[in-house]
Amino acid sequence: MAQRIYNTLSGKRENLESREKGKLHIYVCGPTVYDYSHLGHARVYVVFDVIRRYLEHSGNEVIYINNLTDVNDKIIKRAEETGDTPESVAERFSEEFFIDMDSLGVKRADFYPKVSEHITEITGMIAGLVEKGYAYESAGDVYFNTSKVNEYGKLSRQNLEKIIAGIRVDANEKKKNQEDFALWKSAGDNEQGWDSPWGRGRPGWHIECSAMAMKYFGESLDIHGGGQDLVFPHHENEIAQSEAYSGKEFAKYWMHNGFVTVDKEKMGKSLGNFFTVREILKKHRPEVVRYFLLSTQYRKPIDFTEEAINEAKSSLEGIENSLSNLKHAITVKEGTEKTKDDKEVLKKIDYYRTQFFAAMDDDFNTREAISSVHQMCTVLNSYIVENPNNEVLREALDNFEEFSQILNLFEEQDIDQNEEIIAHLRKLMRELEVKKLKDDYTVSGLMRLVLLEREKARKENDYEKSDKIREGLSHMGIVIEDTEEGPRWQFRRS
């Protein structure tokens, strides 16, 4: 069955066909790193993490980019409030972003380009747009001239009249048209900025993603994704400037996940219903939050309430209990000849497996895919209490492991994965002779050693090892929080 995805650009489901057979280039707009990630951010990156995992499972080579917007007016404002530099604010909250996404089981992107490291590419693209007549300089600023683009508004399906009517800012005398958007903004001597042909300044938000995507993927890519709030103006402007610059289609498919609401209202600081990932993980396991975010089809809004997250917890635990019982039921005895009932159960397992993949092929419908897992569990729960056939049980377990690879859920921590770290910690304990200390001091001392090892790994850029330590601790119910005073740890509250 062909994989079908909903393309925001066309407004309909389409067969997924990569530009290069067997290879997919995906760019997902990353966070503006001036604060902790909230649940809306988490939904974006968990959703596209599963999309990426499924496309890889389907045999594609996926090159996945998630940028970090580390040059932005919000960052500058936060720096002014805290007395820090914009660079230190961006660096701190970039690290906090990784901590939250690691906790939620989001696989690291292949590249995390930063705006601050791509100023040359950005100014080069702006210069090209000016040369082609699509952009103009005005008193140190550079603007994109939307009137030069016939199809401006094709992604959001808005026409210029509606866009102009929706502009609620004071008239900017620097602009030729009020709907034009900034590519480069002038900066004062004491403001964050870089030299450019138009004077000292910094890039506008929209041009950043276009330039970075083209740096890694060339003039065209397969899938460009992000939250629904980015359709207009961010992604609309990306299309306009990118296609004006190259003369080619920028992205073949545009994918957008729905909003996270709280008690049916859009989440926002001004409404007082704003929840960070860090706050939520103090009360709920990361796996529960991830399950909750995947329990609704990605394009639909999802409403966060305590009742909903607790329902997700119970639902996930039901699957985890079934999986645990399944593993316990498997014995080492030789398989016996399958009975009629055994064969019937195998048929049902195969049916729900087929349903799982059909749901994922239909615009990555994780809600229906998870429903298939639950239905398989119902069959297995009844079957296990009988005299189950080991071959049937192993077939079921193989399916669970495959589902886990795609959703990154249901998987129990394998102690052997941390064997190397545990052995090293035991060696350190012997050297420091802490074996005979009281239990509370032993835990505290051991955690101090663990965090020292993690910090050492990070300083040596051994992120695989540092991530492995964090994941191992997370599965043992221990959360690490990196603060200005250094890393802290605590037992996660269930």
Image (tube, helix red, strand yellow):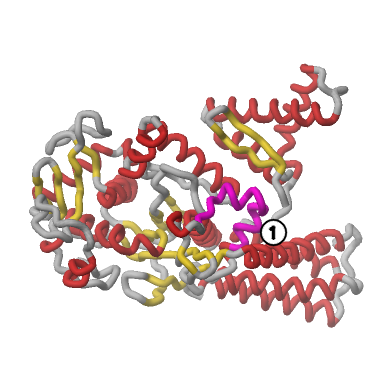
Which percent across, then down, holds residue 14? 39, 74
Residue 252 seen in the current view: yes
For residue 115, which quarter of the picture?
top left
Q: Nearer the viewer, residue 213 or 91?
A: 91
Residue 59 seen in the current view: no
Which percent across, then down, holds residue 353? 65, 72
Which percent across, then down, holds residue 29? 38, 53
Looking at the image, which residue is at 79% across and 79% down?
A: 343
Which percent across, then down, holds residue 32? 39, 46
Reply yes or no: does residue 361 show up in magenta: no
Q: Left or right: where does residue 167 sit relative to residue 320?
A: left
Residue bearing mark 1: 410
Reply yes or no: does residue 289 show up in magenta: yes
- What span is colored magenta in the figure? 274-292
Q: Amino acid at mark 1?
A: Phe
Q: Nearer the viewer, residue 329 or 190?
A: 190
- Element on which disc 1 rests: loop
Looking at the image, which residue is at 30% across and 60% down?
A: 235
Q: Left or right: where does residue 184 sit relative to residue 436?
A: left
For residue 187, which quarter of the picture?
top left
Residues packed near mark 1 inside 10 Å, few (<14), some (14 to 19) or many (20 plus): many
Looking at the image, which residue is at 17% across and 46% down?
A: 126
For residue 70, which quarter of the picture?
top left
